[in-house]
Amino acid sequence: FIHSQKRDPFTGRQEPDNVWDFWAHAPEATHQITWLMGDRGIPASYRHMNGYGSHTYQWTNAEGEAFFVKYHFKTNQGVRSLSAEQAAELVGKDANSHQTDLLQAIERGVNPSWTLHVQVMPAAEAADYRFNPFDLTK
């Protein structure tokens, strides 16, 4: 995926064909495509978006058993998104609109919150799992 985001060395622009090539050759990216090209493509604010950890971490319990974990932060404010037109207008007025929204909400006493969800896999299962749990695209 990272290679699909690299800029053309001659023009300095991102190449849409690289992105489509990645998506076409990586069926597991279908979920990502539906998010990016769907109604949730442009978050209205940090407060109204979920967060997903890319990396897999290891937790070890008191008995020495290892587990691999991934973190998901689900917004308690509800997911809200902007249309392309709304986003262009908002960012045209304030390039730091997400930071501004977050600061102003906290100053009003409307503290945002997220619920942490954790995916857990015993480390022993990772070697034979259907995909590599350390693959950032999964």
Image: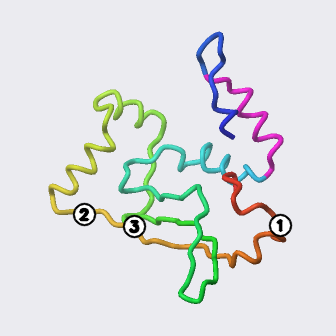
Quarter of the picture containing the N terminus is top right
Residue pushed farthest bottom? 63
Q: Which residue is mark 2?
A: 111
Q: Callout 1 environment at 10 Å: few (<14), some (14 to 19), or many (20+)? A: few
Name which quarter of the figure residue 95 lies in: top left
What numbered label is drawn on residue 114? Answer: 3
Residue 86 against residue 63 in the figure, above or below: above
Q: CA distance from mark 2 to mark 3?
A: 10 Å
Relative side of 118 to 32, left or right: left
Q: Which residue is mark 1?
A: 130
| Colouring chosen for the image of the structure | rainbow
Residue 90 at x, y = what percent?
34, 35
Name the residue located 31 percent from the left edge and 36 percent from the top edge.
96
Circle 3 SS class: strand
The segment highlighted magenta reads 14-27
- Left or right: 99 with respect to 44? left
SS for dot 2:
loop
Q: Amino acid at mark 1?
A: Arg
- Magenta part mainly helix, strand or loop? helix
